[in-house]
Amino acid sequence: MRIAVFGVGGVGGYFGGRLAEAGEDVVFISRGAHLQAIQRNGLQVESSEGNFVIEQAQAHEDPAAVGSVDVVLVGVKAWQVPQAAEAIRPLVGAETVVVPLQNGVEAPSQLEAVLGSDHTLGGLCRIISSIVAPGHIRHAGIDPYVAFGRLDGQHSEGAQRLRAVFARAKGVRVEIPPDIRMAMWRKFLLIAAWSGLGAITRASIGPIRTQPETRQMLKQALQEIHAVAVANHVALPHDAIAETLAFIDSLPAQGTASMQRDIIAGRPSELASQNGAVVRLAHEAGVEVPLHSFIYRSLLLLEMQARGET
C-alpha cells in the first residue's frame, strides 16, 4: 500500500513512521528544516513503544512530485486543513482514501468540500507526541491509537485495507468504530476541555485534575461539550463524561495538550477548531456554553497576536 503522510508533526511523524517501519511504501510530505533533516538523516522516532529510525525515508515538499497514492494521512494542524485539502489534490486518485487525524470534528467536512465524500473518511488518533528537533519525533504519553471510517457508516474497502496495514505495525492500536462521528466527538470531548483549561491555567494535566476548583471546571467543560454534541444529533452517551474523566485521571501528570503548548509558545494554535468550535456549534444549536465562551474569549487576543493580526 502506498501511503502519503501530509504533515509530519508529532501525529503524522509517529503513525507514518510506524507504517514505514512495518515495511509499507510511505512518503512524507513536509517542508523547511524538518524536511531537510528527514532527507539527510532519516526520520527518528523516540517512543516507550520502541525507538526507531526510518533511514533513507522518502520525503518531499511538493505533492505533485509524488503522484496519486492509496491513502493520505493528514497530519497538519486543524486550522491548516482547508489549505491542505487543496494541496492534497495531486495525491488523490480514483481509489484514494483521505484520513484526517486532527483534533476537532470539522476536518472531514472541510476535506469533503474539496476532495469529495467518496475519498474522505472520518478519523482520529490519541497520542502525546511532538517534534523535538528537525527530523526527530518524541512520543511522550498515551498508548498510540488510531481510528477511521466512513461518516455514513458504510463499508469502505480502503478503510479495511488500511486497518490491516496498521494492524501489522508495532506500537499502534487500530479500529474502525461502528460510528466514527461519535468516536470523533468522544475525542473532541477530551481534547477541547483539556486544551482550553491547560492554556488558561498554564498547568499540566496533573494539577488541573487534582485541584478541586480546576477539576470542577474540567467537569463543566465536559458537560458543555456533551450538551453541544447531543444538540447536533451525535449519539454520545451520558457516561462518556465519566469515562473521559477516568481517562484524564490515567494520563501522565506532566502531560500537556498540543494547543496548550502552541499558545504558551506564542504559535498559531487550534483554538478556533477546539474551544472556538464548541462556542460556534453551541450558538448554532441554541446551547449555552459559558465556560468555553470564557476560555475562547480569554485566549483569542493571544491567538490573534500569534497570527500577526493585532
Image (cartoon, grey):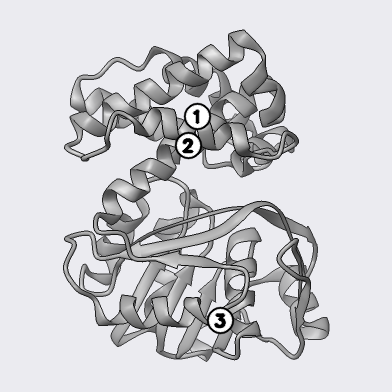
> Dot 1, how many residues are within 10 Å of its Cα: few (below 14), some (14-19), or many (20+)?
some
Residue behind mark 3: 62
Frontmost residue, 135 versus 222:
222
- Frontmost of labels 1 and 2 is 1
The percent position of residue 260, horizontal first and vertical second, equals 64, 35
Report the Cα–Cα distance between label 3 and label 1.
42 Å
The percent position of residue 285, horizontal first and vertical second, equals 19, 26
Residue found at x 28% / y 66%: 114
Q: Which residue appears farthest toward the top when viewing the image?
A: 213
Q: Is residue 90 visible?
A: no
- Sequence-earlier tag: 3 or 1: 3
Frontmost residue, 277 versus 147:
147
- Frontmost of labels 3 and 2 is 2
Q: Secondary structure at mark 3?
A: loop
Quarter holding the N terminus is: bottom left
Image check: 202 left or right of 60? right
Residue found at x 28% / y 28%: 228
- Sequence-earlier tag: 3 or 2: 3
The percent position of residue 181, horizontal first and vertical second, equals 27, 51
